[in-house]
Image: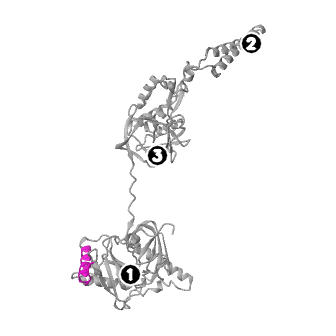
């Protein structure tokens, strides 16, 4: 890669568009930069720089560069009239300068006093004549002169004695432009090009003072050559020779047109950011909304999840699919990720009370179509047997019997939920920082977290953090950079660990230690994030934390 970066020293860029002198050019065209480099080549009396010329030939033979330029604001181009250098308007005898110089030379060469006195008189006379002529040239006119009036009278605009000029300019947000070529020339040409770039003092109008250099770390291009788009002038093969031939004709006095080729440019497409890492559970949830019945508390989340799974199994075809039951037809636990039933509580709000407002049926991220169809079939059967009339959406509510707790009426959502708690995005959006809404049931015993011995308590907390980090990596996620365990809930509306029933409820099984946690990753990860031994029943439910919280 080769890059030339142009810094606009006055913060503005003055140049006319090639096809409309009233509009500014932005960004600077590559052909204009090439011409500025050619103009910076050593002139007569200077030692030729053959490597610099070779570098220019390298540029003209390679494809057009990408351009990194910020947006800009353009200044209105007002009509400006300037006088031409016409002897009919300002008359002056240039020979008087030569007479003064000749008289001074005679004075310097005089040998005798007599000759010096005579030469001194001639010098005084020549200087007096020059001063008198200068005073006449700059004195205000004593009478109206047609040629003088033409400088301020619009009626003489077409006479050629005054000329309309435009000075359009832009002010970029960042006064810097980089031209980036994909290929890189030999090292000696890069050095010569940097040496030549240092000689460039302007780009476009003489008011556009610049500093040009070879840049090892340019900004990424915002414009790239394309098949269609805005046309920019670029150098092509033979550009150096064409510029020299044109200069031999116009000599910076006659009208001239910049030799160039044309190339379409289009905005560079920003590279798509890599998708954030995601765990074993998917974000395409089936959401059941509470429409009637009790408002179960957050602490009942596990028993609620088990009861809803029993209802699904009761309405699923026989044998019950493993994706719903979590077991193979032979009764052994399945090794594959299966359905997680996650009650969704109202938390993280000043009025949050932790009440369960609905349920998410969370399928594996790589769920087979047949497994999803089996879950939907079980819900459909439940809806048909529920005994409720259809609602406006055509989906009847389903009853979830809670024993002494009453009957909870649920409705499957087919449109995005109005309540934020029931929106998957609230629980699944990518984030670096996550925290538990319900405590994580650890896979192993970390030790006594509540020990009065601070060393033992700290050791147990470190072990719990490692267990949580291991659970994260087993789901295919990057290892967290920090895990902090605690007993108190991170979110308003949640509950401390001691408020949740023992897990599992079966006393014949090993009871799990539960902890709340803050989990921080180096890069954002996508949810849902369900961790620990109780993740299929609503425990270990995490929520992303916004930046800055």
Q: What x and y, as percent, mark residue 181?
A: 42, 43
Helix, strand or loop for disc 2 = helix
Q: Which mark is residue 120?
A: 2
Earlier sequence position, callout 3 versus callout 1: 3
Q: Residue at x 38, y 51 (%)?
A: 269
Is any atom of residue 55 visible in this view? Answer: no
Residue segment shown in magenta: 371-390
Q: Position of residue 335 (x, y in %)?
A: 30, 77
Residue extending farthest right: 113
SS at badge 3: strand
Residue 96 shown left or right of residue 456 in the figure: right
Q: In the rendered image, which residue does mark 1 sit on?
A: 534
Alpha carbon distance from label 3 to label 1: 54 Å
| Residue highlighted by disc 3 | 69
Horizontal and vertical percent for residue 380?
A: 24, 78
Q: Is residue 255 above or below residue 524?
A: above
Colour logic: one colour
- Which image quadrant is residue 355 in? bottom left
Question: How many residues crowd around disc 2 within 10 Å: few (fewer than 14), some, or many (20 or more)?
Answer: some
Decide if residue 125 is on the left or right side of residue 38: right
Question: Which circle's residue, 3 or 2, is located before the other in the chain?
Answer: 3
Of residues 94 and 458, the one drawn nearer to the viewer in this rendering? 94
Residue 78 lies within the magenta run = no
SS of the residue under disc 1: loop
Quarter containing the N terminus: top left
Q: Answer whether labels 3 and 1 touch (C-beta < 8 Å).
A: no
Query: Which of these two is toward me, 32 or 51?
Result: 32
Q: Nearer the viewer, mark 2 or mark 1?
A: 2
Residue at x-position 56% and y-position 86%: 452
């Amino acid at each position: 890669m080769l890059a030339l970066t142009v810094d606009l020293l006055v913060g503005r860029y003055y140049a006319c568009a090639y096809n409309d002198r009233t509009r500014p050019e932005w960004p600077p065209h590559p052909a204009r930069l090439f011409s500025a480099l050619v103009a910076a080549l050593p002139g007569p009396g200077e030692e030729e720089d053959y490597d610099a010329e070779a570098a220019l030939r390298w540029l003209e033979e390679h494809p057009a560069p990408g351009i990194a330029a910020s947006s800009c604001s353009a200044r209105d181009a007002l009509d400006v009239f300037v006088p031409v250098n016409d002897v009919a308007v300002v008359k002056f005898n240039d020979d008087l300068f030569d007479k003064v110089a000749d008289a001074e030379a005679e004075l310097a060469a005089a040998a005798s006093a007599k000759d010096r006195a005579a030469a001194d008189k001639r010098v005084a006379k020549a200087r007096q004549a020059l001063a008198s002529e200068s005073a006449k040239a700059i004195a205000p006119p004593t009478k109206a002169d047609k040629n003088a009036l033409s400088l301020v009278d619009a009626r003489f605009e077409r006479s050629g004695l005054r000329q309309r000029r435009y000075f359009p300019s832009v002010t970029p947000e960042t006064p810097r432009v980089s031209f980036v070529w994909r290929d890189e020339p030999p090292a000696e040409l890069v050095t010569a090009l940097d040496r030549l770039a240092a000689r460039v003092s302007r780009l476009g109008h003489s008011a556009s003072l610049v500093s040009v250099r070879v840049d090892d770390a340019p900004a990424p291009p915002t414009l790239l050559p394309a098949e269609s788009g805005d046309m920019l002038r670029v150098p092509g093969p033979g550009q150096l020779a064409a510029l020299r031939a044109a200069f031999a004709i116009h000599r910076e006095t006659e009208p001239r047109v910049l030799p160039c080729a044309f190339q379409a440019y289009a905005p560079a497409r920003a590279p798509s950011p890599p998708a954030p890492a995601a765990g074993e559970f998917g974000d395409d949830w089936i959401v059941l909304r509470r429409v009637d019945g009790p408002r179960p508390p957050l602490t009942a989340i596990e028993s609620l999840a088990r009861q809803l799974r029993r209802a699904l199994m009761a309405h699923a075809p026989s044998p019950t699919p493993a994706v719903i039951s979590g077991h193979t037809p032979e009764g052994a636990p399945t090794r594959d990720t299966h359905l997680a039933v996650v009650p969704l509580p109202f938390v993280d709000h000043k009025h949050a009370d932790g009440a369960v407002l609905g349920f998410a049926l969370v399928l594996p991220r790589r769920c087979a179509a047949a497994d999803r169809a089996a879950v939907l079939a079980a819900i459909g059967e439940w809806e048909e047997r529920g005994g409720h009339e259809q609602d406006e959406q055509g989906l009847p509510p389903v009853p979830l019997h809670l024993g002494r707790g009453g009957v909870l009426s649920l409705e499957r959502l087919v449109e995005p939920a109005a309540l934020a708690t029931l929106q998957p995005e609230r629980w699944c959006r990518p984030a670096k920082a996550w925290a538990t809404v319900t405590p994580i049931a650890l896979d192993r015993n970390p030790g006594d977290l509540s020990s009065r011995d601070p060393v033992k308590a700290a050791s147990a907390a470190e072990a719990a953090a490692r267990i949580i980090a291991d659970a994260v990596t087993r789901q295919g996620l990057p290892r967290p950079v920090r895990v902090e365990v605690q007993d108190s809930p991170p979110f308003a509306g949640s509950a401390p660990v001691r408020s949740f029933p023992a897990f599992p409820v079966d006393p014949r099984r090993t009871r799990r230690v539960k902890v709340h946690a803050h989990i921080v990753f180096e890069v954002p990860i996508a949810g849902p994030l369900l961790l620990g031994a109780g993740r299929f029943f609503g425990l270990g439910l995490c929520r992303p934390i916004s930046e800055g919280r």
